[in-house]
Amino acid sequence: MSDPRTTPSIFTRGAVDLSSLRSAAPAGGNRPDGTPTRAGGGPATGAPAAAGAVIDVTEATFQTEVLERSMTTPVVIDFWAEWCEPCKQLSPLLERLAAEGGGAWTLAKIDVDSNQRLAQMFRVQSIPMVYAVVGGQPVDAFAGVVPEAQLRQWLGAVLKAGGVTVEEPENPLLNAADEALMMGDLDAAEQAYRKILNEAPADTAAEAGLAQVALARRVQGVQPAAALDAAASAPDDVPAQLLAADVEVLGGQAEQAYQRLIGLVRRSAGDDRETVRKHLVSLFIMAGPDDPAVTRARRALASALF
């Protein structure tokens, strides 16, 4: 499925009204099939919560366990059912990540069969359905099973919305890709970076790595001094200027490379101008969006274009 962080939020179609859930009913009771539930809401024979990071929630406990808890800790709601096969894939992954989070966020599991009113209020039309609640309000959601890398990114966005700073765990695949790049195995590096991006299209580290692979291929066999001399003697030769910019980036002169290409954008037009712009953007990707030099260069590029 698409990245839940970049697709339009379901909340743009109308707010989820939770006002009638502010008063909790007595806890406990039976499921529709007669199975007794714990006060927390899950089946009596269900899996134990992972060190308090995973809790079972019913309408009776929703106010305290979700709304009130979310005022200090982000809460992720997992709407599930025992008959739901996809839930058996997603729920264990959510539980593992919640335990791994060490209390940075709480996973609230809600059985839709036992809590149909909650499911209706959250407009749950299919399961698994996952909601994030921060500060007493739903902030994002997605339906279906998503890859672990994509789920980690979604959770990271939820934690950021909740003001929580969590150290990102190392990605073994990213480490392997970086190692292949450093060893000069460009094919293996590209394959690894693309695999990461297939699962998490917004992974900035993999995007930067893929841009580095492309740069490494462009400069293979190039003599830096000769490339810079050629560019100096032909200031409007687009291929020569692009190669010179690549050499400058590799030589630690990224800002000089940006200025070179921004000047070329100003002097060029049509297809040549677009070629230069795309090349410059690929160099930005390698540096990352938080680089101050990239921020300045983006402003200068916008001025040159418009």
Image (tube, helix red, strand yellow):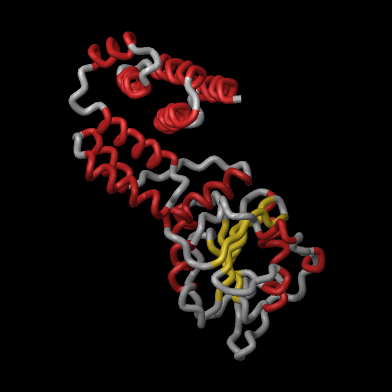
Question: As drawn, which residue projects farthest toward the bottom?
Answer: 34
Seen in the image, is 158 located left or right of residue 260? right
**Which of 10/104 is in front?**
10
Q: Residue at x 58, y 43 (%)?
A: 160
Seen in the image, is 25 located left or right of residue 108? right
Residue 297 % position (x, y): 51, 21
**Which of 175/133 is in front?**
175
Q: Residue at x 18, y 25 (%)?
A: 221
Question: As drawn, which residue projects farthest toward the front?
Answer: 270
Seen in the image, is 10 located left or right of residue 50? right
Seen in the image, is 194 located left or right of residue 46? left
Which quarter of the image is occupied by the C terminus?
A: top right
The answer to whether residue 67 shows anywhere in this view is: yes
Residue 300 % position (x, y): 55, 20
**Which of 120/82 is in front?**
120
**Is 175 situated above or below 119?**
above
**Is 48 situated above or below 138?**
below
Q: Residue at x 32, y 20 (%)?
A: 240
Residue 36 % position (x, y): 60, 84
Q: How many marks?
A: 0
Q: Residue at x 62, y 52 (%)?
A: 74
The answer to whether residue 284 shows anywhere in this view is: no
**Which of 118/154 is in front?**
154
Residue 127 % position (x, y): 56, 73
**Is 15 situated above or below 235?**
below
